[in-house]
Image: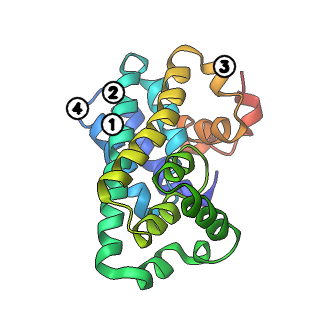
Amino acid sequence: MHKRFHPILRLFAHMRAKAFSPWFLPLIFFLSFIDFFVVVIPMDALVVASVLLRKKDWFKVFIVATLGSALGAIALAYVIDLWGEPLVREHLGTWYVGETWTKTTEIISKHGAWGLILIAMTPLPQQVAVALCRFAHVSLSAIFLSIFVGRGLKYFFYAYCAAFAPRLIMRFKSIREETVELTTDEKDASVDASTNAP
């Protein structure tokens, strides 16, 4: 079990027990929203695991996760407007320098909001891309739409496959390992993910 996921594992254990409670979908929305601030939430795996719990609601899971991400991006952009570069330096830590920052800067500089859509579909940190977009004066509406489209395409793929083709989605190693952790009882979370692969 990854220690950095430990609080999320405990939270998701409660989600599994209350999978059909009224607050299940709002909680997914909340997690996708704060993902832009706490960084360590494995949202891709959470989307997959949530759909595995509620397959009939796969489209709702996709929508709330996407909307939460887009609004989270707007919230981060607004905070950056208020506090500027010092906040970015403190919040992003080692991402503020190094290869990730350089690569993301190149994409945003070349493609602007279109680059943000591309980044939102990849494992690259969205927080860095949103910060760079605000520094480049990309509008809040453009940031919202870019994250909504980029994350939406990715989450739609994950949610649809989890609902109708789970064996396909489990071919992605990182998704499989994180999903196994999220859907396994905490005491068994250290079991090797390969034993759970289809």
In this view, the residue in front, 165 or 78, is 78
Amino acid type at circle 4 is: Pro
Q: Which numbered disc, 2 or 4, marks the residue that appears first in the sequence?
A: 4
Above-or-below relation of 4 to 182: below
Q: Which residue is mark 1?
A: 64
Image coordinates for residue 123, horizontal then vertical, percent:
61, 50
Q: Are marks 2 and 4 in contact (CB under 8 Å)?
A: no
Q: Are marks 1 and 2 in contact (CB under 8 Å)?
A: yes
Q: Residue at x 61, y 76 (%)?
A: 94
Q: Residue at x 62, y 69 (%)?
A: 101
Which mark is on residue 167?
A: 3
Which mark is on residue 22?
A: 4
Image coordinates for residue 154, horizontal then vertical, percent:
52, 35
Mark 3, mark 2: which one is toward the viewer? 2
Amino acid type at circle 1 is: Val
Mark 2, mark 4: which one is toward the viewer? 2
Image coordinates for residue 9, horizontal then vertical, percent:
50, 48
Mark 1, mark 4: which one is toward the viewer? 1
Mark 1 element type: helix
Distance between the Cα atoms at labels 3 and 2? 21 Å
In this view, the residue in front, 16 or 187, is 16
Left or right placement of residue 132 versus residue 172 in this view: left
Q: Which residue is mark 2?
A: 60
Give the class, few, some or many, for how many residues have Cα within 10 Å of label 4's Cα (few <14, many ≥20). Answer: few
Mark 2 element type: helix
